[in-house]
Amino acid sequence: MKVPAHRSLVVRLLATSTVIVICAIAATAWLTVRITTRDVVQEPGRTLSADTDVYDAFIAHAATHPTWDGAADTVRRLASLTGRRIALATQDRQVIADSSPGVPLEHVRPSALVDPLHLDAALARNSGGRIDARVVGPYRISAGEREYLRLIAGSEVQCFREARVAAEVVETPSGRPTVRLLSADDSTGCRPSKLELPVESEKVPLAQLGRQVSECAGIPVSVTPTFALRFTGPAETPLRCLEDSRRDQLRPYVAPPALLFITGPPRLADPPTVSLSRANTTQVVAMTLVVLAVACTATVLAGRRLVRPLRLLTAAASSPADQHGRVDVGSRDEIGHLADAFNDLAERRSQLERQRKAMVNDVAHELRTPLTNIRTWLEAVRDGVTAPDAAVLDLLVEESVLLQHIIDDLRDLAAADAGNLRVHPEPTYVEDILNQVVEAHRGAADAGGVTCVLDAVGDPVLRVDPVRLRQLVGNLLTNAIRHTPPGGTVTVRSRLTAGALTVDVTDDGAGIAPADLPRVFDRFWRADGSRSRTTGGSGLGLPIARQLARAHGGDVTVTSTPGEGSTFAVRLPRSP
């Protein structure tokens, strides 16, 4: 059956791939333009950030070293990270360290003056003033004093927390802990505290600083460990004097001022932008068409490869039932698994069809024999060939019973196939049922010269259907007597195992060939292909026995040794 083009899997795959490719290329082009433009615009900002990092690194060195010894390592490291030339020189342009040779520094404008006591407001990072906080000088406290102040700071933080005010302990570069409030509320009464008093290491430099500020301002001034002033009068002059006095006091502890040179490729006055010009647009469209052509070709090839096995499966499924054959798609993907499932289904369907035909033939054969016998004797009586005496009537009744038995067996099998085979379990003495079955078949056994023996272990009570159990064991016993030669013995043995009842029907007949064991429970199957009633029954007894066992939640199995006999074992659960 031909599929319309708009419903074809190939067309749909092609349309999907086309939409995806167009969207992907358009999105890629838009993102490329947007990201490139943004990066170019942001380049000055990144350059300023890099300059700030370089400046801060040298400020940190100057704040913690009295000289520029070791600065060459910092210069090389920063030049390697930024990819630019970095140089450090004294204020009279004498080179301290230079990352690479280049234009003499006399002709280059310095990027900044590195002095931790006079920070560049445009480049300084988190300075909090013109003097870098990392310049400690004579104010570094000892470990013991640090621990003492940390205890005081912890008590103050606890006071704030009890007043539901967020606070934390922060340690300054000198090692002195301070308390920083994380909220604006400072009306708790937790200040002032001993934390504002100087320790021994700070008393001398703070006193010296206080005298210098007092001489500069002309008024008595005291300085706290956090460099806060206590005085009376206008604040402008003491504050300016404090900053100058601190510089004089800290100058011996920092490196001398130096010029910082950061050079590199020249910057454009106006940042360039990237736009989709006509040439760029042409290139994007051309590339889109190329990618689109490749995607369409790949989609068509993949679609044709995908559709071919589906068409083979469709053609095979649409063929008549008697012409179904295997479909070889040659792939191991999902379609390959579908083909395997289809082939398996076709094989099982063919097998079921063969079984159905064989069953119809077997049923016709089984019904034909008793009907022919009945018709023959009735015609003989009608034509006066024989008299309707007791022997003829007994023969007719016997054939009618056989015909009824075959019909009942077929009805039971049909009910089992439809899932309607019902059992009515009730508490039953198993030994009584087995005694009844053995006694009912003793006449047939004696007539054939076969001895029937019952070997029951105990007298268990199980919830089973007594009628169906008699039928089940009776079918097995009938089959065993029929295949046991004169002088042989058939034994019915029962035993209780873990959670189940097992009934074994054992004969010492000719046994079953290993090749025939899998077919023992097939319907109308006989080991003797001649289908003579002297060597076999209708071929329905064993299949019905297995269905009855399974209706009780159990099963029937067979073991056999040629020349020694066979054993049919019925296993029934104690609580079906």
Image (cartoon, grey):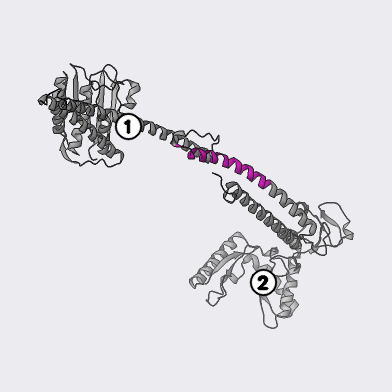
- Taking 379 as reference, is 35 above or below it? below
Q: Position of residue 561 (x, y in %)?
A: 29, 19
Q: State the residue at coordinates (41%, 35%).
A: 349
Residue 310 in magenta?
yes
Q: For the residue carrying disc 2, how many other residues have a C-alpha within 10 Å: few (<14), some (14-19), or many (20+)?
A: some
Amino acid type of the residue that numbered disc 2 sits on in the rendered structure? Phe
Q: Is residue 541 left or right of residue 167?
A: left
Which mark is drawn over residue 107? none
Question: Between residues 296 and 43, which one lies in front from this camera angle?
Answer: 296
Corner quadrant of residue 382:
top left
Corner quadrant of residue 551:
top left
Whether residue 74 is visible = no
Q: Secondary structure at mark 2?
A: loop
Question: Between residues 270 and 55, which one lies in front from this camera angle?
Answer: 270
Which mark is drawn over residue 360? 1
Q: Position of residue 505 (x, y in %)?
A: 22, 26
Q: Is residue 555 left or right of residue 341?
A: left
- Name the residue beneath numbered marker 2: 227
Amino acid type of the residue that numbered disc 1 sits on in the rendered structure? Val
Q: Position of residue 533 (x, y in %)?
A: 24, 23
The span picked out in magenta is 294-320
